[in-house]
Image (cartoon, grey):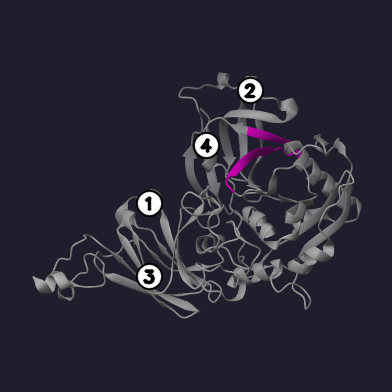
């Protein structure tokens, strides 16, 4: 069976055999394809759930849509991986760019891109091109002036811009200079055609062939106008309102370049750009239990076109917000306390709790505590979320979601408690002042106080004789 070695930098993660077959040999494989993997997240108009599309981009830019027959493999697949895939002949149609896969070998692991300060101490230079594309005499609804109003900081622009978002929410770890982030108007495509990679497309359809063909033809048109498209890693394709059922698409993670697609009026909404580009950064959706887009504290959830940074777990994932402390052990019956600055106030503004006392790493999620105050780029935080301590779970790693969504479990105001039964942890917000929150946690061992051990066994804030039941006894 094929063996894959996954690497990040010089470190070998693991040796994995990814196969559906219990027994296999070289004779089982009739042909294979190699190339870079692209994972695309679909944002539906209804924002109810999401689907993923897996693509293989060969060195000549030919793309094949992959059907992963063993869906358990999907969570281990990331954009930027260089892979070899083994299609099932009777289920695959390479002439239509469709491959059904029952085996995949990771030849080179996709090294997560760090949108963070580099080794030279300089901020990461974010480089993007927004292509305004009209198709079949159907005009794009966005304009250079309209997008510029929320793209760049200026004396006359919207007070909340993409430039301000990246530079502020990243704590100046990302730069968003106007010369690095351009808007390219005047791209007019016909009603059908064949792209440079051989994809035949039709303006009345919205398949994989269409979305990649539109991107390729937009790039070619911009090149003919004199633009050097190769300078821009993140490429945003803004389309007219059409038959596509999605509001936006974004490649999750980014190799040498990556795409985002927006359609219709979505091209005039900053929050949609930050959501889809968030996928390019490697972020998954921000959820609540049972609702994939339920966390409205982040552009990666479902909310509104109001300013707010990504949630605490995702800010940490990107390297934009640092951990005040990472807690892996906690003495039972004792309280531990922190002052947690608001995310927009200090770059060290999350507490990580990996409760190894409750189970092995990876089996029990890591918890993130952050404080969201309605100031700066968090001023658009909604009631019920503003001036509160947020408790998230997230199991990905730095710069790499590994397929995990972040999930908001609680938003606590001053004097509120939150009980995490799975790890026997109680979170208490002592107070907030608009710039920081004082937060305490305690690991309980029982629901009844032991009256003579000097511990707060039930973590109710009362120890031994402070407990009424103990005094009565």
Q: Which mark is residue 91?
A: 2
Identify which residue, 343 or 431, lies in the foreground. Answer: 431
Residues rendered magenta in the picture: 48-66
Q: Which of marks 4 and 3 is nearer the N terminus?
A: 4
Q: Which of marks 1 and 3 is in front?
A: 3
Q: What element carries label 1?
A: loop
Q: Name the residue under label 1.
A: 364
C-alpha span from label 1 to label 3: 24 Å
Q: Earlier in the sequence, mark 1 or mark 3?
A: 1
Residue at the (53%, 75%) spot, across then down: 346
Q: What element carries label 3?
A: loop
Question: How many other residues sit within 10 Å of disc 2, few (<14), some (14-19) or many (≥20)?
Answer: few
Residue 161 shows in this picture: yes
Q: Earlier in the sequence, mark 1 or mark 4?
A: 4
Residue at the (59%, 22%) spot, across then down: 29
Residue 473, quarter of the rendered image = bottom left
Residue 156 shown left or right of residue 136 in the figure: left
Residue at the (70%, 25%) spot, across then down: 93
Q: Residue 73 carries which label?
A: 4
Q: Position of residue 7 (x, y in %)?
A: 54, 46
Q: From the viewer's perspective, is residue 406 above or below residue 70?
A: below
Q: Which of marks 4 and 2 is nearer the N terminus?
A: 4
């Amino acid at each position: 069976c094929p063996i894959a070695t996954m690497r990040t930098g010089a470190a070998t993660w693991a040796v994995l055999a990814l196969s559906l077959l219990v027994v296999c040999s070289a004779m089982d494989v009739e042909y294979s394809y190699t190339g870079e993997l692209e994972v695309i997240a679909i944002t539906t108009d209804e924002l109810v759930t999401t689907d993923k599309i897996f693509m293989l981009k060969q060195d000549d830019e030919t793309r094949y849509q992959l059907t992963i027959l063993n869906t358990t493999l999907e969570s281990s697949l990331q954009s930027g991986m260089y892979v070899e895939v083994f299609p099932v002949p009777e289920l695959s149609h390479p002439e239509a760019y469709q491959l059904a896969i029952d085996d995949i070998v990771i030849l080179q692991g996709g090294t997560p891109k760090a949108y963070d300060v580099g080794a030279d101490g300089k901020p990461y230079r974010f480089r993007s091109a927004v292509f305004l594309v009209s198709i079949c005499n159907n005009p794009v609804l966005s304009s250079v002036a309209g997008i510029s109003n929320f793209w760049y900081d200026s004396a006359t622009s919207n007070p909340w811009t993409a430039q301000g978002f990246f530079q502020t929410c990243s704590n100046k770890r990302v730069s968003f200079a106007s010369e690095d982030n351009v808007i390219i108007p005047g791209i007019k495509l016909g009603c059908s055609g064949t792209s440079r990679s051989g994809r035949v497309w039709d303006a009345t359809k919205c398949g994989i062939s269409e979305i990649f063909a539109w991107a390729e033809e937009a790039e070619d048109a911009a090149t003919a106008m004199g633009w050097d498209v190769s300078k821009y890693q993140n490429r945003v394709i803004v389309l007219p309102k059409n038959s596509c059922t999605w509001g936006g698409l974004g490649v999750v993670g980014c190799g040498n370049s990556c795409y985002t697609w927006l359609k219709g009026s979505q091209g005039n909404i900053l929050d949609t750009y930050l959501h889809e580009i968030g996928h390019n950064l490697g972020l998954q959706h921000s959820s609540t239990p049972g609702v994939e887009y339920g966390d409205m504290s982040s552009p990666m959830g479902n909310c509104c076109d109001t300013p707010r940074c990504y949630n605490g777990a995702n800010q940490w994932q990107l390297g934009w917000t640092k951990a005040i402390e990472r807690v892996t052990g906690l003495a039972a019956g004792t309280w531990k306390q922190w002052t947690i600055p608001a995310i927009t106030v200090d770059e060290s503004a999350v507490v990580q709790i990996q409760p190894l006392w409750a189970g092995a790493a990876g089996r029990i999620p890591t918890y993130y505590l952050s404080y969201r105050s309605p100031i700066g780029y968090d001023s658009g935080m909604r009631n019920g979320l503003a001036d509160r301590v947020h408790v998230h779970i997230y199991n990905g790693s730095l710069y790499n979601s590994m397929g995990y969504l972040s999930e908001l479990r609680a938003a606590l105001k001053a004097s509120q408690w939150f009980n995490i039964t799975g790890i026997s942890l109680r979170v208490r917000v002592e107070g907030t002042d608009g710039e920081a929150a004082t937060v305490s946690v305690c690991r309980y061992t029982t629901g009844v106080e032991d009256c003579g051990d000097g511990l707060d066994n039930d973590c109710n804030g009362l120890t031994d004789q402070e407990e009424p039941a103990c005094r009565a006894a």
